[in-house]
Image (cartoon, grey):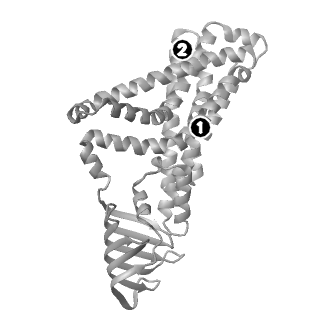
Amino acid sequence: MRILDRYVLRSVLSIFLTCLLTFVFLYIVIDVISSLEDILKQKVGLLILIKYYLSYLPIIFVQVSPFSCLLATLYAFGKLNRDNELVAMRSAGLSIFQIARTVIIFGALVSFFVFLVNDRLVPASVILTKKIREQIESGTKKSRDKEHQDIINLAMYGLKNRLFFVNKFSPATDTMEGIIILQQDPQQNITKKIVANKGVYKDGVWVFYRSITYDLDTTGQIIGEPHYFDEEVMDITETPADFLTQRQNPDSMTIGQINDYLDKLTHSGATTVIRNLKVDLYRKFTEPLTAFMIILLGIPFSLKIKRRAAGLASFGLAIIMGFLYYVLNAVGIALGKGGIIFPAVAVSLSHIAAFITGIYLIRSLP
């Protein structure tokens, strides 16, 4: 590594770590203050608080890393410009890309690390912090009771093109009540409807009580006589654990878990759910690129910081560009989940725009 690269990297890295630690500290302080009433009311111990905020660190890191990268880029290159070091580098024959190369590589490495943290640590952190938060807000005893709380109005897309609608699912007893199962064919026509008062999972199988099965034609009309059973062993491969996972949102699932769930839904006909899950899956790959894209957008503005007035204007423009980047990202995700554009295009829209804009602005610099 050249001496110049080490000099630039040391400046960017020190500011990045300073911003990161500052944001983490402020995040924790603000959260403690906002939850202080519950903490004092429930007499939450110091060890529980430490465990809570340690588990929250991966989530905070993923959220504040892009903005830390932006501030580090603006400050480091702004300082080079103000001290006329940038002029010396250009006089030595270095191009803007050669000067910014170290920071661009640094942004790529931060994005890769964010990707690992977001996939390996954040899902477990989301689940753990939610559990501890419930314990802080409602007390230890109530929190333990909530682990076995009944799930009301559960809907699930299962294997063999089945749609499950359950009025109440009790994890403590592996029992379902008010069950409706709709069986679909590959063309999404309902071919069978199963209604049962109760279902109990025991010895590895589901046993339904007072169940009625209706066979339907392609128009939804009943074929023949319904089949009634006081007790029936059902051919259902889903376990209680599968029903429990339906409470999880994609933020608390790894890439592998979302992929597995998508495989189960492939032939279910649940097009809307599949499309939304694909958007969430692709986001797992593209959102870590935010740090890299923010650095690309920040470089051309940071290199214009020389005088105080110009520096403030460039800093403000960089913040605005970052804000527009997040707005475009939110719009793209909404369009993807609405089925207007393909999921892969939806999550990549803001990144493509940021990459093209950043490269263009850098190449436009004198």
Residue 324 higher or lower than 308, as above or below: below
Q: Name the amino acid, label 1.
A: Leu
> Which residue is located at x 49 percent, y 54 percent?
337
Q: Is residue 207 above or below residue 11?
A: below
Q: Which mark is residue 311?
A: 2
Q: Position of residue 246 (x, y in %)?
A: 42, 58
Q: Quadrant of the N terminus?
A: top right
**Which type of secondary structure does the marked residue at label 1 adopt?**
helix
Q: Is residue 178 left or right of residue 265?
A: left
Circle 2 Cα neighbour tier, 10 Å, few/some/many (<14 / 14–19 / ≥20): many
Quarter-wise, where is residue 36 in the image? top left
State which tag comes first along the sequence, 2 or 1.
1
Spot occupied by residue 352 in the image (x, y as percentages of width and height): 62, 40
Q: Position of residue 37 (x, y in %)?
A: 22, 31
Q: Residue furthest top?
A: 83
Q: Residues within 10 Å of mark 1 (few under 14, many from 20)?
A: many
